[in-house]
Image: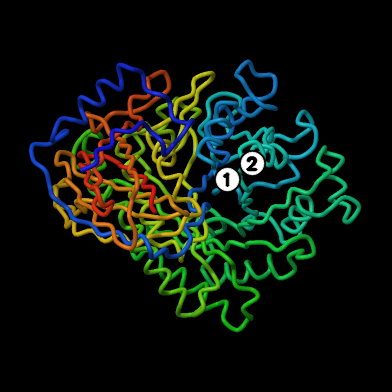
Amino acid sequence: MQKHNLPPQITNEHLVKPSRRDLIQSVTCLLAAPLFGQSTQDVVARLRLDQPGPQISRHIYGQFIEHLGGVIYDGIWVGPESKIPNIRGIRQAFVEAMKQIRVPNFRWPGGCFADEYHWRDGIGPREQRPRTYNMWQADYPGKDKGVEPNAFGTHEFIDLCRLTGAEPYLAANVGSGSPREFHEWVLYCNAPEGTVSVADLRVRNGAKEPFNVRYWGVGNEPWGCGGNFKPEEYATEYRRFVTQYPYAYGQPFLIAAGPNGGARDGHLSWTRGFFQAMQGHGPRLLPHGWALHYYTGQRRSAKLPANSPDRFYDVLEAGLRMDTLIEEHWKVMGEFDKEHRTKLVVDEWGVWQPREEQQVLGPRYVLSQHGTLRDALHAALTLDIFNRHAEKLAMCNLAQTINCLHSLFAARGDQFVRLPTYYVFAMYQPHMDARRLPLEMEAGTFTAKSGQETVTLPRLAGSASRSDQSVLVTLVNPHLEMPVRLRVELSGGQAREARAQVLTHEDPYVEHDVGKPEVVQPRPLRVELNSAGTVLSVEVPAHAVVAIQLRVA
């Protein structure tokens, strides 16, 4: 057997480099077997190296930022006069961290905020922009209660995208806006100087070249905060907004606002009602994307302690429902769109904690939550689901990137910390734009208690992809105590080299927060490759995410 104890390669320079003491402790821990449990489960998997499937779009690894609590203001926007290091008002640490994981896109300005946002309020000299109402700031203390300053508008958002290399995804106002307002925003962003007058307005505001925005969402959650429509009513509004879209200035990717996956039936009625109402209007009016929202709550265990196995397993099992939601809505869409011209977009997903665990950063940070290892496992399980459904998905956006819900970062003043979920996106980077490989695992399931109920989880879950001679296998072991001894049988090629990283911690309830050290970071993990390069062996610790990178012939 060839044994490899190699330094991290998968995530390159963006990872915080471990100290010599960390590495000694890590190696000591990794050489101990089992890691955290008392026994080990054996699992066999098969990986075909010569059967690349559909491309895993990089946009599946997208992000969502909304004018909500501390997401934009203090999280991303600190202002050019701030003593906090910034680039034209945008927090420098945020820019650098997002570049390191090659963020593919940002969705903005909402969310529910999108349907009360009028884009003209956020252009021109910042000191002359109006102060408007923001429902998400209604609980703010003091004079900022309910106030949106509009300091961060279209130009600032495009600047953020260009600084980080992300593509912009703008959500248009259907709830309180009009088709004309939407079309003029498109023209403001995309029409060249000297064409329509609103393009010249953009130039006067400092942007000579068009922004070339391709991704446009037509409203947000119209079944709720976006207008309380019925699906047939929203279909009518959608057609009004897109029928005279200004195609002269670029071919768009139009995204219709889809179902609430958290509804009892997964909101299949919303998908069926919309597509049924679109029948007879011609395929040209079909959206390019259909946006599903799904937040994982604590269905059975919200009143139990956060650091309990009941809550841990409840959240992870609830997250696995994403797999069923994708399958079910894809099937309903196919009843009306047999060629599947419309792809799924999951532009809001993540863990939503109970109310008493929100605003952990303070009263101005609405929906802020602790960043936990459990949330990292949830994110990894979800991203693996997305990878396995690559042919169905055009884009996905984690809600939300910073200071809110299932975040990658927490920031308050000059403090900035990466949360465990950030490192999942770092480890999963090589999946972006790679081609999915078939990974078959005979892992089975285990059951656990969550309150008075029983939950069922996989012993091991994962996905695999290939880009040229590089293969990435990502794995999640959701069990709190039992490691998994995995044997991967490779066919259709041989592996020349294997490297692995693991994201875990002895304490499964460990949290990251501002002012605390980032104790959950990827570490090297021992992986064994036989001399023929056809069998891979690795022990996946309990409550861990593992990424294995292979160099193949």
**Residue 507, quarter of picture:** top left
Are dots 1 and 2 in contact, CB under 8 Å? yes
Q: What element does badge 2 sit on?
A: helix
Q: Three-letter amino acid code at disc 1?
A: Phe
Q: Earlier in the sequence, mark 1 or mark 2?
A: 1
In the image, residue 36 sits, relative to residue 383, either above or below, namely: above
Quadrant housing the N terminus? top left
Instruction: State how many labels appear.
Output: 2
As drawn, the label of residue 59 is: none
Which residue in the protein does label 1 denote? 106
Q: Three-letter amino acid code at disc 2?
A: Cys
Measured as percent of width and height from the top left, residue 157 is found at 66, 40
Measured as percent of width and height from the top left, residue 125 is found at 80, 32
Q: In this view of the protein, can residue 137 be seen by the observer?
A: no
Q: Farthest left residue? A: 38
Task: Determine the residue positioned at 56% across, 36% down.
Answer: 99
Which residue in the protein does label 2 denote? 161
Q: Farthest right residue? A: 194
Task: Determine the residue positioned at 55% across, 49% down.
Answer: 112
Q: Give the spatial CA distance, label 1 vs label 2.
A: 7 Å
**Residue 523, quarter of picture:** top left
Q: Residue 347 vs residue 538: left or right?
A: right
Camera-side residue of 519 and 118: 519
Measured as percent of width and height from the top left, residue 244 is found at 75, 68
**Residue density around tag 1, few if under 14, some if 14–19, many if 20 or more, within 10 Å:** many
Q: In this view of the protein, can residue 517 be seen by the observer?
A: yes
